[in-house]
Structure formats: C-alpha cells, structure tokens
Amino acid sequence: MSAERKSGSGDKGAGPALECRSVTVELPHRFGRKRIIEDISLQVRSGEFLTIVGPSGTGKTTLLRVMGGLTSPASGSVLVHGKELDGPPDNVVIVFQDYSNALLQWRTVAANVAFGIERTLDRTDIEQRVRDALALVGLEKNAEDHPWQLSGGMQQRVQIARALALRPDVMLMDEPFAALDAMTKASMQDELFRVRDRTGTSFVFITHDIEEAVYLGDRIAVLKGSPGRIDQVFEIGLPAPRDQLSTRQLPQFLEFRYAVHQAIGR
Amino acid sequence: MTHSRLWRQYFTVVAAALPPARGMLPLVVLLGAWQLSQTGNSPYFPPPSDWCNGLVLLEKSGRLYPALLATTMTMLLGLAVAVVIGVGVGLPIGVSPRFSRAVGPLLEFLRAIPPPAIVPVAILFMGYDERMKLTVVVIAAIWPILLNTSSAAEQIHPMLLDVAHSFRLSAVDRMRLIILPSVVPAILLGIRVALPLAIVVTLLVEILTSVEGIGALMIGAQRNFQSPQVYGLLVLIGLFGLFVNSVFAVFEAILLRRWPPKAQSENF
Amino acid sequence: MDERRFFAGINWPGTAVFVLVGLAWEVVIRSGLLEYEYLPAPSAIGLGLGQLAREGTLAPDIAHTLIAVAIGWTVAITVGISLGFLLGLSPTARRYSLASIEVLRPMPGVAFAPVGLLLFGFSLKTEMVVTILPVLWPVLVNTMGGVSGVHPRLYDVSRTFRLSRKDTILHVILPAVMPPIVVGARISLSLALVLTVVAEMVGNPEGLGYGIVREQQALRPDLMFAYIVTVGFIGIVLNAGMLALAETVFPSSRQLRGPQ
C-alpha cells in the first residue's frame, strides 16, 4: 500500500479544509439552555485524519453536528475552505452511528448510495459514481440488496459509500464502528485508510476506542469537561502505512495510548 | 394501603397517561355547535341538553340502573370466565410446542370467525336469556387472552427454563414461580384487548335480543323514536367504556410496576 | 400460531387434528350419537352453501356486504390517512385533538346502530354509520404514529444532503410511513367487514349479516352456519389479499408484518 497522500493540493488551496473558531453551542435543556461545548477552536487540514476522543457527554456529537451544519453555534463560526457555514455545506458529509436509521431501508443499496447525487448529476455520472463508491467499500455484489438484508458492518459501509459518492472534502464520522465486532472494526479501519489514500478526503472521526483513535489519527483532539472544551491535541507521529499488527505493537503506539488515556482520565 | 393513598395513586397514573386537556377542544366545539344550532324540535338531531333530560327520565323510571348493572355484570363475569379458560388453555398450548402445532390450524380456523357471528348461533342453541349472553361474551373475550397467553408462554426465554431445571423445581413450582409470572404482562394485555370486545358483544346481544341491558334500552328507545334517549345512552356507553378502560389501565399499571417496561404494541 | 407457520410449512399433526375433528363431528352427528337439534354436521353446512348458491341468494348477499365494506373502508381510509398526516406532521394539531380522539376511539360501533336506524331506517346508510367511525381509528392512529415517528436521523440525512422540503416529503417521509399506514389500512379492512356484518344483523336487513340472523330465526342452522363460514372465508381472503397487494407494491413493508 503506497504512502501517497494527497495533502491539501489541487484547487482547494493550502488552507484548512474545515475550521472551527471559538465555537460555543447551547441547546435547549429543560426550562433553559445548556452550554454543551465552549470555545472550540480546531483546524482540519486537507487529507488529514483527525480523531476526537473524550468522556461521554462532553459534546463530541454536538461538535460534529456543528461542523456538519446541522446545529448552529451560539457564538463563534465554522468555516469550510475559508467560507463561513450557512446550513449543511455541500462538500461535507456526516456518517451517523445508527446506520439502520440513517439509511433508507426501502431503497436498494445502489439507490441509497445514489441518494446524495441523484438530484444534481445526470444518469451516466450517477451510475459511475455509485459503482466507484461501492467498489471503494467492497459492496459491488450487493448493489441490488436492501439494507435490512445486510449485516451491521455492511450497512455501515453502505452509509460510507453514500457519503463517498458525493466526493466530499471532509467526512465527519460519529463513532461509526462502535456497534461492530472487533474483526469487522479492524477491516473497516483499514478500508478508511484505503479511501483516504485514493481520494484525499479529510476525516473527522469520533470514537470511544482510544486504540482506534491512535491507530487511525494523524492528530487526536481530547474533548473534556462540562461544557466540553479542547483539552489537548496530540500529533500522532506514527509511520505510514499503518498496519493492524505491527503498528499496534510499536512502543510509540503504546506511549500515545497511555498519554491519551491519561489526558482523558485526569 | 389507605383509601386516600389508593386514590392518589389512581390520579397520578391517570394524569400521567392522559393527553393534554386542550385536546378536548374539537369535541367541545362540536357539541357546542350542535347545541346552539338546534332551535326547533328536530326529531333526528336533538341538542345535547335534551340528551341529559332523556337520561334523567330513564333514571326516574327506574330502568337505567338495573340495565347498567346487567351490562356491567355480564361483561365482568364473562371476562373473568374468559381469563380462567383462556389462561388455562393458553398455557399448555404455549408450553408444549407439539401441542401447539397440533392444535394450531384448528384454532386459526376458529379465530377467523368474527365474534358477532357467534351471537345468532348462541341464540339458536340457548335461547334468549342471560346465560346465552354470558356464553357469547366468554367466547368472544377468550381469543385475545388465549392467544396472548400462549404466545407469551411460547416465548419464555429458554434461559429461564434452564434456571428452573438447574434449581430442580417441581413442575408445579416451575409453573407457579417462573412460567406464570412471565406471562402475566401478556395476560393483562390480552384482557386489555378483550375488554372492548366484551363490551361490543354484550351490547350486540342486548340490541339483537332485548335481553336486559343498556343495549336493550337503546334499541327500545329507538323503536319508540325517543331520540334524545338514544343519544344520551350513546354518550353513557362512551363514558362507561372510558371509565372501564381507565380503571383497568390503572390496575394494570399498579400490578405491573415490578415488571420491566416493555414496548406495548397497539392491538385492536 | 401465526400466519407464517400456517401458510409456509406443512403442519402434519395440525392438519391431521383439524381433519380428525371435522370427521368426528360429522360421524357423531350423522350416526345419531349426539342428538342436537341445532348442530348441523359439516356436510350439511356444505350442502347448505350449495343450496344458497343455487337459490341465488348467496351471491347478492356477498355482493351487498362487500360493497358496503368497500364504501365504508374507502371513506374511512381517505379521512384517516389525510387526518393522520396532518396530525402526524403538526405537534400543535396533535395537542389540540389527541384527547378527543382518545375519548371517541373506544366507542363500540354497534352502539351506533340505534342511532343509524333512527336517522336512516333500514338502509345502506345505517351500515355506514356503524362502520365508518370505528374503522377510522386504526388507520388514523397508525398514520399519525408513522408520520410523527419518522426517525430524526432521517431528517438529519435529508438536511445533510440538502434536500428541498418537497423532496424530503416525497423521497424520505412518504416511503418511510408506508408500512405502518398499510398495516393500519389492513386492520381497518378486517374491522370494516366485522362491523358491516354487525350492522346487517341489527340494522339493515340485507347482506351476509342479515343472512345469518334470518336463517337463525327460520331455525335453519345449516344455512346459518353456511353464512358464518362465508363471512369467515371472506375475512381471510380480504386480509390475505391486502397483505399480498401491500407486499408487491411496497416491498419494504415486508419488514413490518404488523400486529396479529
């Protein structure tokens, strides 16, 4: 597997793909508003894999939703390629944790993957993109199946394919592999690497699994406290390409794992 | 438990389960409009105020309470018998897969016959009396209870039966301590479905045969063109149904407070 | 004990029991072992059916009942689905009508029979009065529940992919709510049959319901049971037909076989 990584080149410029500037989010809570996350400033570089970890309830999902334009910040701003957000931006896609509720169960896999592009592209382009996306996630044979006929891992791959068909600059993923068994999780992690290497997409990846965060991430942001704030950002200088067996045995891997655990637990 | 504590429990459960009161608006508006639009003496659409007068008249003639009592007693008694038979037959069916398979198609066939169709059969077999009315209610109410009981017994987690086995429980103890408690929620659900069924069948018999009850009063009023009484009795039946259902809902909630809440499926 | 088992596998012990019971019934009555004036043997019921068909009374009765069911059910699902959508989409509308629905819903259809007779005498309209209101509820409640229960995730997905409001309703909400609506319509259909038969027993002297009562009063139990069996049979056909239709038009409803 080549280590070639398209980092921020091309027509998008060298700036960050996505940026949060002092983002604070408040949500209705009982009879008032509760501050979920506060003063979040974060940059997602092009082609980067940024993982976000933190204790439960610190607002990781909320942060992701703000980045995806589903929730508006009370103060601060979110910029995609330098432009401030006004609703969900069209080159950023969210992959949700509960895949069975996020897929259109009544459509075939192919129709699901086409969902984001069927209104904007013509027929031949749609078919091509669907085929490419399905090939990227290894589901070419299941194009005519329905999601409810597939396993959890496969359904999640359909959701990823749907996101990929859009050729997004940034993919926001909310604990996408939390409901999968260990072996499926491992192969899905490597699949993401393959996608990133071939498309140059940036990833923002929320997870509870610290080892997953270290394995996948170029950087790890630790969200802590109530309201949630960025506590630390780790630069993960592990060599690429990463491998499930050898990378996870490296002493640096263990050091990073220890450090992140410490950061969260403190 | 003291009386006041029981009432307090009743009201808390009822209040929590009730939809917001402003939802009564459409009904109130409808009745109000009806009342206001009726100036003349329309024999077909008497205003709601006349309904009350009609009911009062019935009460004064001494026929209202005996009828109400007759309907209620038939319904309750019929339900009780249906529970005994339904659970008594449903449990063995659910517990033994062989028995269940053998009896399956027969029960499916019998279930396909709508309860109201049984009424004329019962009339033919038993004549026009209270016993016949009771029999029909029992036959109608049995099905939801029997089916719910048997399916719940069938679905008892094999793990629980393993537990019974490993603690070497006798068959009686196993039934008493494990099987019966497991199916109680289903039995109650069956009763909840059977309740409106019992009311419908009771009324049907009374309307068809004029055996004593609210239905008989209603059809009698209709034959005498006493339209206010017909509408009044309709409202009475509605309130009666509402009251019975709410009492049972509270009873069920109190009884089931120790069971884990399960997603209740809507059964009609 | 569910449809799947009944239609799919070959249940030898079950069929055997069924056939044996039928045979025993036949033998017991024919041989005079059990003398019961009003209990006909299965063969007598079969002959009764044939007689009714030959006399030309069965077909018109079936037709009348089916027409009444069709009219009542169509009206009920039209109103039910429309109202259900309205109430499902608007929490405010729900707040202002839920209590009324909960009060009206338990009203037994048969209680409307005297009202129908009062207003319309012996006519099809009386059957409608008995049928329409109770049949409305299953489809209305299911539609309302289905529409208001569309998972918030689906709305998130629509917004993430920047769907217009029209596209959201057409491509996301409508397909998502079809299964519960279809289930509600199916339950309503079964209910419509039962209520129509009831209305014909106590209200309008026409159709299968009246047939049952008429033969009961004429002391012809064989014909009475023939009518009853016909009603049961039509019920099964209607239900199975609707199930098959729903699953061909909306294959996704296979996921939700609905309450039995």
Image: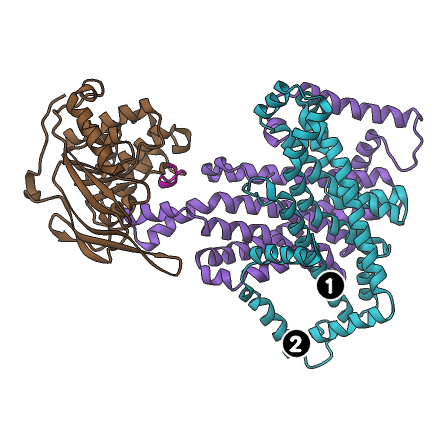
Chain colours: A brown, B cyan, C purple
- B224, B21: nearer the viewer: B21
- Mark nearest the camera among 2 and 1 is 1
The residue drawn where x is 65% and y is 51% is B250
Residue B104 seen from this side: no
Q: Secondary structure at mark 2?
A: helix
Q: Position of residue A127 (x, y in %)?
A: 25, 35
Q: Which quadrant is the N terminus of chain A positioned in?
A: top left
- Crowding near the residue tagged with mark 2, few <14, some 14–19, many ≥20 C-alpha atoms within 10 Å: some
Q: Which quadrant is the C terminus of chain A positioned in?
A: top left
- C70, C182: nearer the viewer: C182
- Toward the bottom, the furthest residue is B39
Magenta stretch in the rendered image: A100-105
- Crowding near the residue tagged with mark 1, few <14, some 14–19, many ≥20 C-alpha atoms within 10 Å: some
Tag 2: amino acid: Gln
Tag 1: amino acid: Leu
Residue located beneath label 2 in the image = B35
Q: What's the CA distance linking mark 2 and mark 1?
A: 18 Å
Image height check: is C21 above or below A70? above
Res. A11 image quadrant: top left
Earlier along the polypeptide chain: callout 2 or callout 1?
A: 2
Image height check: is B233 above or below C157? below
Residue located beneath label 1 in the image = B236
- B259, A262: nearer the viewer: A262
Residue B256 seen from this side: yes
Q: Is residue B241 magenta?
A: no
Number of dots carrying numbers: 2
Give the chain letter at badge 2: B
Q: Position of residue B152 (x, y in %)?
A: 63, 33
The residue drawn where x is 10% and y is 44% is A16
